[in-house]
Image (tube, rainbow, N blue to C red):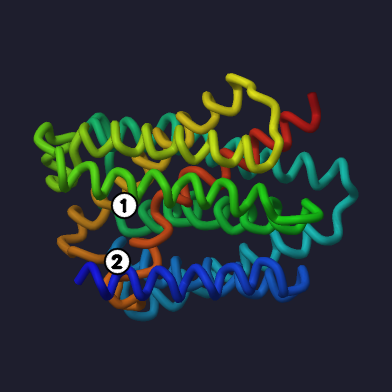
Amino acid sequence: MLKQRVITAVILLLLLLAAVFELPASGWAVLVGLTVMQGGREWSALAKVRGLAAASYLLLTLILFLVLLWMYFNLSSQQKITLQLLIYGAAAAFWMGVVPAWLMGVWKTQNAWLMAVIGWLVLLPTGMAMLDLRVENPQPWWLLGVMGLVWMADISAYFAGRKFGKTKLAPSISPGKTWEGVAGAMLGVTVYVLVVMMGGGLQQRYSIFLYAIAGVVFSVIGDLFESAIKRQAGVKDSGALLPGHGGLLDRIDALTSTLPLAALVLILTRAA
C-alpha cells in the first residue's frame, strides 16, 4: 500500500509541476475547473445527494465556478480584490468558526442540501485560491510553497505518528491521528521553512514561522473535517480515483483549508 501511495504521489507531483509551469492561464483555469468538478462529484456522494439531485448539484457547481471565473478575468482590479475578499472571508469564517464547532460536536448537519452548500464553501474558494496563487504571480512560488508546506506537514505527521504515536488527537473522528504526529508536522514544517528561507534568500522574520504554524493547524483541521464527513457518510475514502490514496478529496483535504487562507493573507499583505 505504501509503495502504491508513493508511486501515485510522485506521478501527481510531476503532472502538477508540468501544469503549473507550462500551462497558460486559460489552461490552468480549465484544470482548476476539472478539480472543482471532481471534488463536487465526490462531495455529493459524501452528502448523500444522489441521482438527478446529484446531477443538478454538479451543474450548479459548474455554473457557480464559471460565473466566478468570468468575474475573475473581467472585473477591474479593485472589483477583483472585493470579490477575493468576499470569497476568502467566507472561507475564513467557515474554517475558523463552523468547522471547529462541527469537530467539537457543537453543531453539525446531515441535511443533504445544506451539506451540498458546505461543499461549495470547501471547493469554490479552493479553486479560486489555486487561480490567484498561480495566475497573479510571475512565478507560482506562492502556490507551490503553500502546497509544499501542507505536504511536508502531512508526510512528517504520517511518519512521526507511525513511529511515536500514542496519544490520540481525535479518536472519535480519525483514530489514526495522534498528537505526536502533529508535533512531527510542526517540526517538519519548521525545517521546511528554514530551508525555503535560506534557499530563497528570505529575511529571517518571525511572521513567516507564525504563518507556517498556522498553516499546519489549518491543514490538520481540513484533514479532520474531511475525516468527520467520511465517518458521517459511513465510508473510508471519498472515492477511488487515485490508487493508494482514495478520492481527490482524500488528497486535497488539507489544501482546502489552507489555500484560501493563504490567498487571503497574501491579498491583505499586499494591501497593507
**CA neighbours of label 1 inside 10 A, class few (<14), some (14 to 19), many (20+):** many
Q: Distance between the residues labelled 2 and 1?
A: 9 Å
Q: Which residue is drawn at 29% across and 63% down?
A: 46
Q: In this view, does 150 lie to the left or right of 223?
A: right
Res 258 label: none
Res 226 label: 1
Q: Is residue 121 left or right of residue 233?
A: right
Q: Is residue 11 above or below residue 135?
A: below
Q: Marks 2 and 1: CB-CB under 8 Å?
A: yes
Q: Residue at x 75, y 58 (%)?
A: 135
Q: Residue at x 78, y 51 (%)?
A: 137
Place of residue 10 in the rendered image (x, y in percent of width and height, measured from the top left): 43, 71
Q: Quadrant of residue 261?
A: top right
**Secondary structure state at the residue bearing disc 2:** loop
Q: What residue type is labelled 1?
A: Glu
* Most foreground residue, 21 or 68: 21
